[in-house]
Image (cartoon, rainbow, N blue to C red):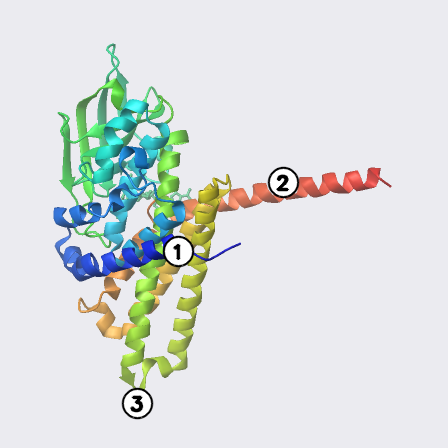
Amino acid sequence: MDFDLTAEQRTAQAGFRQWVEQHVVPVADANDNREQTPPDLIAKLAAPGYLGALVAKEYGGEGMDALTWGLLCEEVGRGSASLLSLLTVHGMVIQSIAKWGTAAQRARWLPVLATGETIGAFGLTEPNVGSDAKSIQSIAVAQPDGSYVLNAEKRWISFGASANLILVIAKVNEKPTGFLVERNMPGFSSEPIYGMLGFRSANIARLIMRDVIIPPENLVGKVGFGFSHIAGTALDHGRYCVGWGCVGLAQAALDASLSYSGERYQFDVTLNKHQLIQEMLAEMIVNVKAARMLNYHSAFLKDRGDPSLIMETSMAKYFASRVAAQVTNAAVQIHGANGCSSDYPVQRYYRDAKIMEIIEGSNQMQQIIIAKSGYQQHLVAKRAARRSSAIEGEGK
Ligand SMILES: Cc1cc2nc3c(=O)[nH]c(=O)nc-3n(C[C@H](O)[C@H](O)[C@H](O)COP(=O)(O)OP(=O)(O)OC[C@H]3O[C@@H](n4cnc5c(N)ncnc54)[C@H](O)[C@@H]3O)c2cc1C
C-alpha cells in the first residue's frame, strides 16, 4: 500500500494548513468563549470552496477525493472542532442529496450548498431519543395533494441555529423518512443551546417544527428510506469527518504539549527531560500516528468504493475519538494549572474531545457494531476454512 500523498494532495494539505493558521486558530478560543461561529467565518470557509468540496464539479463544487477531504477535515479539526462540525453536517446534507436526491433536488440544492449560500444541518436526535434512533417520535402525515405535515422536535443540532436547510428524519406511517426542511417554512423555529461542555461555537440548537407543510419535492429518496439509506449515508460521512477531525484535534494537543514541555522548567530541567512526561509524550505520538493510519486506510477504501468501508470508518472514528480524549487529557496534565486556564487552548481541546466520543453514534454504539461485525467475519473465515479443508479431503 502506498502511503504517499500525491503532489496535488500535498499542495492542497499545505493550503488547508495555511488557511486554518490564518483564519481559524486566531479566533477559535474567542468563538468558543462567545459560544458562536460568526457568519463571517462561515463565509471565509465557503470562499476557497471548502463548503463545496464534496459537491461534484458539474454542480459547481470541487469534486474532492476522499483522502484530500480527510486532510481538510484533519486541518480544520486541528483549528476548531466546532468549525469541523459545520463541514461534517453540511457534508451530510450534500452527500444525502447527491446519493438519494432526485435530479431536480440535486440541481436545486447542490449549487447553493457548494457556495455556502445555503447551509445544511442534520436533524435526527430528539429530546427522548438518541442512540435508539429507530424510536424517533417525529411524525409526518401524508396529505391527499402529495405534501406532508411535519411535527417534530430535534435537539442538539449542530449549526441548527444558522442552517437554512435541515435534513430531518421523521416517521410516515411508522416508516422513517428523510425531509428537506427549509428555515423559512411556516411553523419552523429554532432556539440556540448555550452552556455545552464542548463544541461551544457549533451554533447548536433545538429545532421545532409545528404543522410544517413539506411539499413532495422535499422528500428525499422514498418513504421508508430514512435510516436504511439516508441516515446511513449521512452518518457514514459524519463518522469519516469526525475520525479525521479527531486526528487534527489530537495533533493540536500533541503539538502544544511538545512545545510547552520543551520550554517549561521544573526541578532545573525542562518538563520533557522527566521520564514520566516522556512516557506521556511517547503514548501521544504513537496513538496520534495510529489514529491517522486508520483514517488513511478508510480514505483508501473510500476512494476505491470498497464495501468494507463502513465498518473501517466506524473503527477509525471509534479509535480516533478515544485517542483524542486520551491525548487531550494528557495535554492538560502536561500543562498543569496553565492547561486548566483560558490562556492555553488545551482546555478547549479536552472539552471538545469528549464530544467526539458521543456524536455520530456514541462509542458504545460503535463498540456494539464493531463486535457484531467482528463475529460475522469470524464465522465467514471459519466457514471458508471448513470448505477448503473439505475440498482438500476430497482431493486425497
Ligand atoms: C455537541 C453535540 C452536537 C450534536 N450534533 C447533532 C446533530 O447535528 N444532529 C443530530 O441529530 N444529533 C446531534 N447530536 C446528538 C448526538 O448524536 C447524540 O447525543 C448521540 O447520538 C447520543 O444520544 P444521546 O445523547 O441521546 O444519548 P443516549 O442515547 O441517551 O445514551 C446515553 C449513554 O448511554 C449509552 N448507551 C445507549 N444505548 C446503549 C446500549 N444499547 N448499550 C450500551 N450503552 C448504551 C450511550 O453510548 C451514552 O453513553 C449532537 C450531540 C452533541 C453533544
Judged left or right of residue 70, residue 290 is right
Q: Which of 364 and 5 is in front in this view?
A: 5
Q: Name the residue under label 3.
A: 268
- Mark pair 3, 1: CA separation: 45 Å
Which numbered disc flags the more N-terminal residue, 3 or 2?
Answer: 3
Q: Residue at x 40, y 77 (%)?
A: 278
Q: What element carries label 1?
A: helix
Amino acid bearing label 1: Ala
Q: Is mark 2 on a helix, strand or loop?
A: helix
For residue 289, what is the image quadrant? bottom left
Disc 3 residue crowd, few under 14, some 14–19, many 20+, Cα 10 Å? few
Q: Which residue is drawn at 21% across and 39% down?
A: 115
Spot occupied by residue 41 in the image (x, y as percentages of width and height):
16, 50
Q: Do the residues labelled 1 and 2 touch (CB within 8 Å)?
A: no
Disc marking residue 7: 1
* Image: 120 above or below 107: below
Q: Which of marks 1 and 2 is in front?
A: 1
Q: Do the residues labelled 3 and 1 touch (CB within 8 Å)?
A: no
Q: Mark 2 points at which residue?
A: 380
